[in-house]
Amino acid sequence: MSDLMPYDEAVEKFDPVFGLEVHVELGTATKMFCGCSTVFGAEPNTQTCPTCLGMPGALPVVNELGVEGAIRIGLALNCSIAPWSRFARKNYFYPDMPKNFQTSQYDEPICFDGYLDVEVDGETIRVGIERAHMEEDTGKSLHVGGATGRIQGASHSLVDYNRAGIPLIEIVTKPVEGIGARTPQVARAVVGEIREIVRGLGVSEARMERGQLRCDANLSLRRSPDVPFGTRSETKNVNSLRSVERAFTYEIRRQAALLTDGGTVVQETRHFHEDNGSTTSGRIKEEAEDYRYFPEPDLVPVAPPAEWVQKLRAALPERPSERRRRLQSEWGFSDKDMASAVGAGAVDLIEATVAAGTTSDTARKWWLGELARRANENGLDLDAQGVTPAQIAELQSLVDSGRLNDKLARQVLEGVLAGEGSPTEVVQARGLEVVSDTGALSAAVDEAIAANPDVADKIRAGKVAAAGALVGAVMKATKGSADAKTVRDLILEKLGTV
């Protein structure tokens, strides 16, 4: 059996059906059922207490802002809000589950039956939302001693329970059918739209590189839209938009090859590998009954008053689609320019860069040009490169003031990405500022003229355009630090053409 089928052949032979489970960490100050801090990056196991560690006799208390965040997300996803819902215990044993069960919602979620519209290639596609329910996040396992950071090959594992108990909203889509070859792109668009929604609501920073938004990617294939769904796989904890697209692409190719060769798809969880875009088997997927759900006896049901829900509905911010149309008008972008910005996940970045003091065209040039190229080369989402919109605005201001040219600006960007400080600090540390002092450039110009007498003669004869060759020689000699206009003026002056 070949491992993978060519993508075009796979989607010609099979009809993909996909679903997503998107997990959003809420940005509350304290955890969902206790008062422990949720600040990211603290020393391991310093933000814990008897409740989030599951100690006997410790009782949970629901975080009101967690409930509010869930309702606001549900409303933004066009969901119905349940007048009465309750928590359940989802029982399973993992080292990062200190209680050996997860406090979640099962048969009575707080938000249900919604939808989300996404735009892909100029077409609006409606994706059904099955539910959005409240639960708590798990701790984080760190596997030590292996080459990959995974449990295979590790000598031992450590567990940090700081994340255990952080409010989590799980958004579950209905099966998405009839998308065909565009399945990976549509799935990416759905996750990207959810990220924009929760950021716009202010309920989460949704930084995927920190695990604040991650998704499980479910996929099945069938021979025809007229037959029942196939057996699905579930690729767990995919944590970038780019990886969502790659995971679905790989699974379509893998399952198509398996089915074509007479194999059977196993209902299982799978792990996604960032380095090569592949997935590997994890464990056989449990069914709901395997989790032995039962109502949480230590928490009362959640019954949000109707007037509170209406107040939250009335205070919702503009939808991402409305915001994009407004920004496109403000920025003067063409439909193609805006589609490129949306596809690259650059809208928020461009907006923040403009707010920091640069123009929309300049912000777009940086984020969709040099930074998009680097992100693609390094396999990163655009906003996960370690450079901020404020730094890009500062970098552009150095260009606008004449202190940097485009070539030097790219070198400064390299320094910023390498963690050497702000653009101004990198300029000072590396000595990259443009040289426009005629005295400092005079010797380099003289050397260029002496080394290229034939070019100098053409310029003296009136062929001023030939000065470009000498300018290039000076720029090469000064490693791009010379001001090109100043160099050209000096050349023409020395050769008596001005």
Image: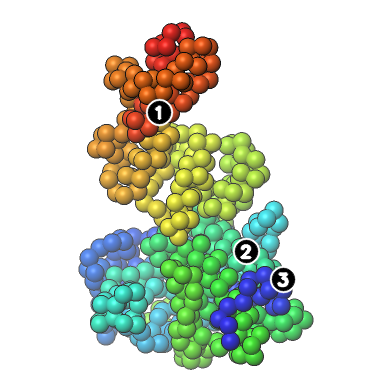
Q: Could you tell which of marks 2 and 3 lies nearer the N-terminus?
A: 3
Q: Name the residue under label 3.
A: 178
Visible residue check, residue 14? yes
User: Distance between the Cα atoms at labels 2 and 3?
Assistant: 11 Å
Q: Quadrant of the N terminus?
A: bottom right
Residue 269 x/y as whole percent:
49, 82
Q: Name the residue under label 1.
A: 473
The image quarter containing residue 218 is bottom right
Q: Name the residue under label 2.
A: 186
377 left or right of 398 in image: right
The image quarter containing residue 446 is top left
Q: Could you tell which of marks 3 and 1 lies nearer the N-terminus?
A: 3
Residue 153 x/y as whole percent:
31, 82
Pointer 3: residues within 10 angstroms few (<14), some, or many (20+)? few
Q: Could you tell which of marks 1 and 2 lies nearer the N-terminus?
A: 2
User: Distance between the Cα atoms at labels 3 and 1?
Assistant: 59 Å
State the SS at label 1.
helix
Mark 1: amino acid: Ala
- Eye-nearest disc, 1 or 2: 1
Q: Nearer the viewer, residue 333 or 457?
A: 457
Q: Which of 75 and 454 is in front in this view?
A: 454
Mark 2: amino acid: Val
Q: Which residue is drawn at 30% across and 67% down?
A: 35
Residue 390 x/y as whole percent:
39, 41
